[in-house]
Amino acid sequence: MAVIHRTTLSPTKLELLTTWLPTRPWYAGPTRPSLVRSGGFRLDDPQGEVGIEFMVATDTSGAEPVPYFVPLTYRSAALAGAEDAFIGMTTHGVLGKRWVYDGCHDPVLVAQLFALLDGRAEPQAQSVSDTPDRTITHSGTGSPLGVAAARATDDPTGTYLTTRDVTLRVNRLLRPAADGPEGARGYVSGPWRTPEDAEVRGVFAELRTP
């Protein structure tokens, strides 16, 4: 399981996201965001090489707060062919330089997200080492999903990971909702906290037939 280091990042994750989010087609704000971390979870890379985090970051710059779901990967070197998914570089106090990517375009995160849906991966606490996150609800097909040819597409409604058999929609703008979206073959949902420190839940990703 991944080890969570109590150390510094420079620039911080939120500083990187403040610059990157407005470049995304699903970003809803009219101005530069003001972000706070509101929740999330992690998954483990079976090879132990890539950090995998699913962050909820809330933009508080507008009249109403807007929570975003941002899958992230952290690598020790650049990911070839993923220039469009590059968020920025940061220096980790223990691990040194880290290349940060939009995880929906990183094959390691995509594989583990599908593994979560078919029961081969377990969600981990965002900020505590070796601790399963029991607040994350996930339901899927119960059988392995082929993801070798998964293609990621961004549009104003979110990010779509499409294979020959299924489409996984990653909901980038979050809204409070009940678990188990109607008509979905599988889903991942979980909690985050509002700026008023209330806990709400919503659907992070939903699996459907193309």
Image (cartoon, rainbow, N blue to C red):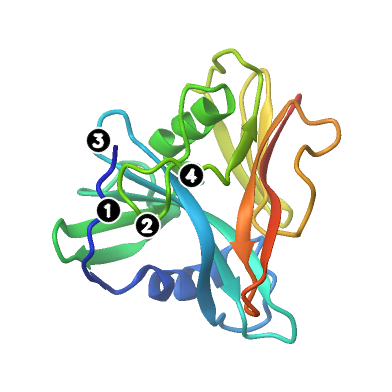
Asked which quadrant contains residue 193, the reply is bottom right
Q: In this image, 176 relative to 94: left or right?
A: right
Q: Which residue is mark 3?
A: 48
Q: Which residue type carries mark 3?
A: Gly
In the image, residue 120 above or below residue 9: above
In the image, residue 6 above or below residue 118: below
Q: Which residue type carries mark 1?
A: Ile
Q: Is residue 63 or residue 102 the one in the foreground?
A: 63
**How far apart are labels 3 and 2 at the CA level?**
17 Å
Proximity of marks 4 and 2: CB atoms separated by less than 8 Å: no
Percent of width and height locating residue 18: 48, 75
Q: Residue at x 64, y 67 (%)?
A: 67
Q: Which residue is mark 2?
A: 127
Q: Earlier in the sequence, mark 3 or mark 2?
A: 3
Q: Earlier in the sequence, mark 1 or mark 3?
A: 1
Proximity of marks 1 and 2: CB atoms separated by less than 8 Å: yes
Q: Which residue is mark 1?
A: 4
Q: Residue at x 68, y 81 (%)?
A: 30
